[in-house]
């Protein structure tokens, strides 16, 4: 049995029983306890559970704190790169004329991919609108892209411009596609982030886009980060590296959200 299948079964058991015990899972799956402990360690690093003595329990439902952007970049780097590559495929398929991309480490990986985007067959450049000066600085030299930087107060924690000016500017825009990051994605609560000002800007971004794609690594799935910015019904595509658990997968299906695995 592959590790991914074992981990899916562990999460399914956790969802049913509210707790998993290393000895019982190892016996049921016919593997060593050390193998299960490694699986639990991996799932904990993705935020899918919390290890306790002898097993694991569900993660804490609320996460109020924020990591700095430098701290975020070091987490799940390979997964974020795969998500960015998958999101680039979405751009090639849909050929949008304009894209809104918000601040974040996963969207930052997307900005790196956009920096290498080749010129289209048509003479029109892709318009990229962002509230993240750092992301704009990565891509503005690409002759295939025209960058529009949103105004506002710059948050030192995330490098995002927020506030009434940012929202007012977004309300005057209509983009073909919005690419959003998230700190949490829950079946009932939807997409969330720890800061109320960033949540307001993300909500305005969703409102300003014809379609919305959320880029979220597996550690964000099943989490709530205090301030909701979008219900699942407002998310057209979820691009992630880990298959959502049964509860979230069912909610995404009901919401009409397409899931693409990276």
Image (cartoon, rainbow, N blue to C red):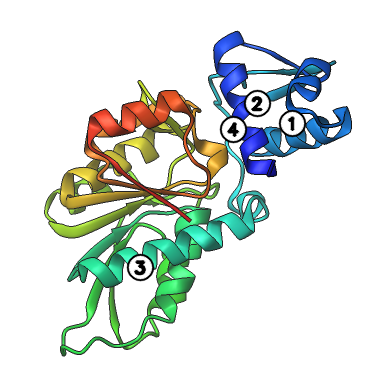
Mark 1 neighbour density, 10 Å: few (under 14) some (14–19) many (20 or more) = many
Residue carrying label 1: 40
**Where is residue 229 drawn, in percent x and y?**
32, 34
Can the viewer see residue 174 in this picture? yes
- Distance (Cα) linking label 3 and label 2: 32 Å
Residue carrying label 3: 89
Question: Measuring 53% from the left and 55% from the top, which residue is drawn there?
Answer: 105
Q: Are marks 3 and 2 in contact (CB under 8 Å)?
A: no
Query: N-terminal of the two: label 3 or label 2?
Result: 2
Instruction: Please tell me whether mark 1 sits on a helix, a strand or a loop.
Output: helix
Q: Which mark is residue 8?
A: 4
**The N terminus lies in which quarter of the figure?**
top right
Query: N-terminal of the two: label 1 or label 3?
Result: 1
> Is residue 128 positioned above or below 59 on the image?
below
Query: N-terminal of the two: label 4 or label 3?
Result: 4
Residue carrying label 2: 10
Mark 2 neighbour density, 10 Å: few (under 14) some (14–19) many (20 or more) = many
Query: N-terminal of the two: label 2 or label 1?
Result: 2
Question: Measuring 49% from the left and 30% from the top, which residue is drawn there?
Answer: 245
**Where is residue 262 drawn, in percent x and y?**
48, 56
Eye-nearest disc, 3 or 2? 2
> Is residue 205 positioned above or below 246 on the image?
below
Residue placed most toward the observer, 171 or 220: 220
- Distance (Cα) linking label 4 and label 2: 5 Å
Instruction: State how many labels appear.
Output: 4
Q: Are marks 4 and 2 in contact (CB under 8 Å)?
A: yes
**Where is residue 255 drawn, in percent x and y?**
24, 31
Q: Are marks 2 and 1 in contact (CB under 8 Å)?
A: yes
- Distance (Cα) linking label 2 and label 1: 8 Å
């Amino acid at each position: 049995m592959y590790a991914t299948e074992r981990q899916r079964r562990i999460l399914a058991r956790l969802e049913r029983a509210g707790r998993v015990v290393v000895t019982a899972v190892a016996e049921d799956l016919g593997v060593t306890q050390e193998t299960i402990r490694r699986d639990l360690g991996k799932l904990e690093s993705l935020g899918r559970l919390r290890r306790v003595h002898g097993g694991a329990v569900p993660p804490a439902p609320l996460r109020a704190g924020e990591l700095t952007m430098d701290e975020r970049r070091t987490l799940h780097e390979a997964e974020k790169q795969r998500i960015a590559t998958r999101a680039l495929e979405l751009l090639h398929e849909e050929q949008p004329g304009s894209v809104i991309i918000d601040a974040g480490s996963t969207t930052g990986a997307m900005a790196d991919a956009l920096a290498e985007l080749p010129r289209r067959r048509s003479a029109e450049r892709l318009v990229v609108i962002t509230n993240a000066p750092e992301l704009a600085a990565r891509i503005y030299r690409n002759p295939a892209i025209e960058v529009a930087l949103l105004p506002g107060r710059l948050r030192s924690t995330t490098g995002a411009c927020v506030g009434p000016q940012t929202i007012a500017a977004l309300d005057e825009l209509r983009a073909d596609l919005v690419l959003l990051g998230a700190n949490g994605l829950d079946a009932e609560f939807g997409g969330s982030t720890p800061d109320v000002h960033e949540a307001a800007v993300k909500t305005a971004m969703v409102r300003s886009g014809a379609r919305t794609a959320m880029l979220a690594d597996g550690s964000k799935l099943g989490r709530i980060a205090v301030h909701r910015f979008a219900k699942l019904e407002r998310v057209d595509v979820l691009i992630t590296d880990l298959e959502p658990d049964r509860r979230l997968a069912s909610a995404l299906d009901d919401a009409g959200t397409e899931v693409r695995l990276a």
